[in-house]
Image: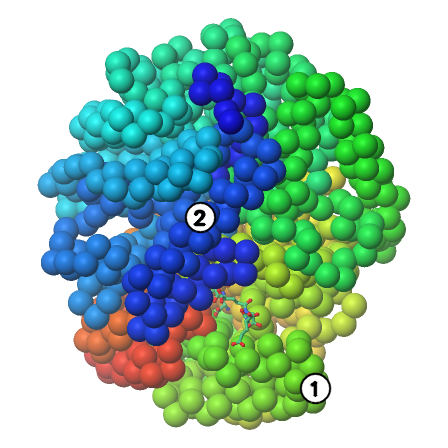
Amino acid sequence: MSDPQTFTTTVLGTARIGRNRELKRATESYWAGRIDAAALHDVAATIRRDTTADLIAAGLDSIPVNTFSYYDQMLDTAVLLGALPPRYDDIADDLDRYFAAARGNADVTPMEMTKWFDTNYHYLVPEIGPETTFALHPEKVLAELAEAVAQGAPARPVVIGPITFLALAKAVDGGAAPLGQLDELVGVYEELLARLADAGADWVQIDEPVLVTDFAEGLPGLAASVYQRLGELSARPKILVATYFGDAGASLAALAGTPVEGIAVDLVRGSVESVAAVPALARKLVVAGIVNGRNVWRTDLDAALATLGTVLGSVGSLAVSTSCSTLHVPYALTAEEGIDDNLRGWLAFADEKFTEVATLAAALRDGREAVADRFEASAAALATRADDPRLNNTSVRERLTAITTADITRGDAAQRAAEQRARLDLPELPTTTIGSYPQTGDIRKARADLRAGRIDDAQYLTQMRQEIADVIALQEKIGLDVLVHGEPERNDMVQYFAEQLDGFLSTQNAWVQSYGSRCVRPPILFGDVVRTAPMTVDWITYAQSLTDKPVKGMLTGPVTILAWSFVRDDQPRSASAFQIALAIRDETVDLEQAGIGIIQVDEPALRELLPLRDADKAAYLKWAVDAFRLSTSGVDDGTQVHTHLCYSEFGEVIGAIAELDADVTSIEAARSAMEVLDDLNAIGFSNGVGPGVYDIHSPRVPSTDEIVESLRAALKAVPAQRLWVNPDCGLKTRGTAETVASLNNLVAAARSARESLG
Ligand SMILES: CN1c2c(nc(N)[nH]c2=O)NC[C@@H]1CNc1ccc(C(=O)N[C@@H](CCC(=O)N[C@@H](CCC(=O)N[C@@H](CCC(=O)O)C(=O)O)C(=O)O)C(=O)O)cc1
Ligand SMILES: N[C@@H](CCS)C(=O)O
Ligand SMILES: [Zn+2]
């Protein structure tokens, strides 16, 4: 049992989708009406109980609770604070209201979704307007606390803090920046702390990851005043303010100057020097995030122990922890088969990380000798990494050394546009889609059947070709101008490529939540990246053989492949990005040689990897742009290069988007009212652009009229010669009926807009 005064071993949070994605299946069944709310709650309770039991078994003496979520922790926080947007007020049932906010329904649009810091996890963006009021609804956190206590857990409730909640919210209804409502909101946290104290909580963890960023001015000052105020409460649990995803910088001293008892610091991305520089930490519990919660590499235990030894000298007491929640890594390495011994030895997923935390804490408490066998096993496994030939491919390294500016530069953009116009002969306002068509149950089942040996390669190929033929026929019927093959053969736009590239390990069960019930299996980029054969050419040329309309080749770009993989940590990420770029470049050249005239290289993660601190942004954008250009500059001027960006606010990277120098950029804009076009104009962007004219994240079918309206708005910012008409992202998550209806309206809207252009 934990000493309520302090604790020594913990993690900041855990995954909640379930070891076998039980929550995904249960929520999707609930939405489809196949199970009722009680059955869904049962699955959720089992996941929570199992997670708590696993953490107890791992030997942790303080256990996070309320890190479970049916959909998203920011949405949970909006509910906790009574700050759901009012458009959901009429929905009486709590669960249905919650899911309506998450996903929308026939009557209401969902809350916006965007990336959580620089991760591939998406949160729902709180909406704060002048009329927003806050009111405490602590039922979930209190229930989950009681549940864990009943299980015998030394439970520590976790909530997102007020600064992070408001800094990540968006202003609506003409309101000012949401952080202006911080004072009022802190009052609700005061009430919450009193309720948690009444419920017997010894500690509460308040997550403030925004303190490692430059997202808003004056964050250290806000940290000081908010936690001074909360710290002065008389009846409250001990407060642990958790910073993660980077170095808390000046906020660390600000927090240390308040009465809070504990501060969690990220020692993977942050530095020991920052801790040593704050004398007031000598009076605090420092929760040392030494085990990487963001990546899958085994911890170098000796190095970690040395770091902890240094930290110990400058803090009041110390607990060992992961650097952030293990939400971002898969559950268990033991669920993976077929990994060679060398590579397996370098890895640690969540379960293995819990053990690393416990081992390090034991070494601090009892001395390294007490757990020497674990340290030695770890060191021996990691020692095999340096000499593994897969980490050092001479030919790819030599090729990269020889790259010059000419290799990342295409011909003059206007000249390219003229050549492409002559070659492609497209109408004004050409219509297209972003790549994927609905990934139906039949498609996924075919892949599951192939994996299980129920069908063979030839049968799988036949079925996928039929899917492609159907999608081509559908697009011709709808009347789209530039067609796609629909991506049926792709389990995922990153994993599909990783499975074919040397240097990547693809997993079978290593699922990580991406948003809501949607999961991905990030590949593990462990070595040098080499393309051994074309990856997409057969599929695309088959699609092109079925139609006279141009079919776009469809590739994922180097930054996105990197961003959505677990990346080796023994060289800069840029070095791996350039290796991937060479592989994609070779693929574009092969597609061009096979007669494909348009090639799209998707970079939806360009914005996601933007560093959280302003000082680091320019260097990132330089290598990210160069990697993209390396991947797309091998083709002739007459080949039209498209790119696609989504899932973000693009303001900060708008200059980089222009520097990508794609001939056509399709970009999510359906929810930001064409602001992106004004931003592009402001920097003189003059290539083709396709602002998304409808939101594919909701089943709602946009009317022709509303798409015409979007196009009219777009035409005020962009001349018809440069404007493309497309949805804002791929259609893989949509149903077929709504897709067909939406695209019919999109084509009708483009025709109507063309007519009005005369
Ligand atoms: C564009 N986005 C992507 C991101 N990251 C990626 N790595 N990939 C992306 O596409 N980040 C930003 C956004 C996030 N958006 C999404 C959208 C959709 C999904 C999604 O649908 N995920 C699927 C899993 C996709 C997949 O890997 N499919 C595989 C395996 C399918 C499967 O689960 N099979 C079953 C058996 C199936 C059956 O019998 O019917 C099984 O194995 O048990 C495949 O198609 O082969 C999801 O289900 O969550 C993710 C991110
Ligand atoms: N080509 C991909 C891009 C998604 S961001 C798709 O259409 O799904
Ligand atoms: Zn997209």
* Residue 582 picture location, percent across and down: 71, 59
Which residue is rendered at x = 65% and y = 64% of the image? 508
Residue 150 occupies quadrant:
top left
Which residue is rendered at x = 26% and y = 14% of the image? 234
Question: In the rendered view, does 524 fall on the left or right side of 473?
Answer: right
In depth, the one of 203 and 744 nearer the eye is: 203
Q: Is residue 141 above or below residue 123?
A: above
In depth, the one of 452 and 130 nearer the eye is: 452
Which residue is rendered at x = 21% and y = 70% of the image? 106
Q: CA distance from mark 2 to mark 1?
A: 39 Å
Does any portion of residue 754 appear in the rendered image?
Answer: no
Q: Is residue 297 above or below residue 594?
A: above
Disc 1: which residue: 456
> What element does badge 2 sit on?
helix
> What element does badge 1 sit on?
loop
* Residue 653 picture location, percent across and down: 45, 46
Residue 558 occupies quadrant:
bottom right
Disc 2: which residue: 48
* Residue 157 picture location, percent across and down: 38, 34
Residue type pointed to by label 1: Asp
Does any portion of residue 234 appear in the rendered image?
Answer: yes
Task: Tell me which numbered mark, 2 or 1, is placed earlier along the sequence.
Answer: 2
Question: In the rendered view, does 519 fall on the left or right side of 146?
Answer: right
In depth, the one of 541 and 407 nearer the eye is: 541
Residue type pointed to by label 2: Arg
